[in-house]
Image (cartoon, helix red, strand yellow):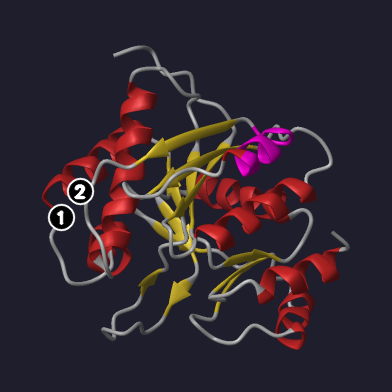
Amino acid sequence: MKQIVENDKVLLAIQFWNGDKAQAMALARLLADLELEHSKKADVLFISRFDTFHDRSTVDYVSRKFNVFTYTSTRRGVGWPTGCNELFFGMIDWVYHMKAAGKIPGYKAIFAVEADCLPLSADWLSVLNKDWDDEDAKRKIYVAGCWIKEGPFGVGHINGNAFLSGRLKFLKSLCDIGGRFNSGAGWDWVLSKQFKEVGWYSMPHMAFDWRAVVTREKLESEMRRGMVWHHGGKNLDGLKICRELLGK
């Protein structure tokens, strides 16, 4: 194993399959447009399901503002939640093995991004970076994101569109779990007990509104409350509204 040089960057892991590819690519382009220069805070990983091709034009577009990697997961799961879980663990496999081999930078955290997310501020990345750093300085944290008081199973947990520690030992533990993971529920809920034990954090500037209709009024309200990241919109309408509100 090569010596790992840790850095202060986050890896934005944008996960997608054919069903949400268009929305994921539109989100990636908006994230690139919000950056004033080539980012020193984050790199991007486009992680596609085994049966989904990468969009080379979007990869090239985003490369103007971020260092970019692409990977197609070899895991074969489909449907909910198996397909979502397999895509997530495929991403973790890639990050762990590439980092352990010294083939990617020593990211402090990985942001697991799904297509149904919206940036609500041009400086969203700086805000979430600071939230992570401030809490991690107080105590080591391994998972941070939107706190869901009661999900579909009545158990509180951090939503899967979350920051995950880049610490190699933690990534290895997730790889090991992924190798035997077989559940009829999402990984974020199933692993909530383990995440609580190692250290989790409810980020104060992230909003969650699963599968709700995204409206201009709703996003404006979240912005007034200081939210910089929204998760939950299942179509392109939210991205169009965000572009209007952010002048992009």
Number of marks in picture: 2
Q: Which residues are magenta?
A: 57-66
- 200 or 78: which is nearer to us? 78
Q: Is residue 100 above or below residue 176?
A: above
Q: Is residue 191 visible?
A: no
Magenta stretch holds residue 65: yes
> What secondary structure is marked by label 2?
helix
Q: Is residue 73 above or below residue 20?
A: above
Q: Residue furthest right?
A: 247
Which of the 4 image quadrants contains residue 170?
top left
Magenta stretch holds residue 149: no
Taking the image as shown, residue 12 lies to the left or right of residue 52, namely right
> What secondary structure is marked by label 1?
loop
Return the x and y of residue 9 as percentages of the image width and height.
59, 34
Amino acid found under the numbered disc labelled 1:
Phe
- 162 or 77: which is nearer to us? 77
Label number found at residue 181: 1
Q: Residue at x 48, y 18 (%)?
A: 5
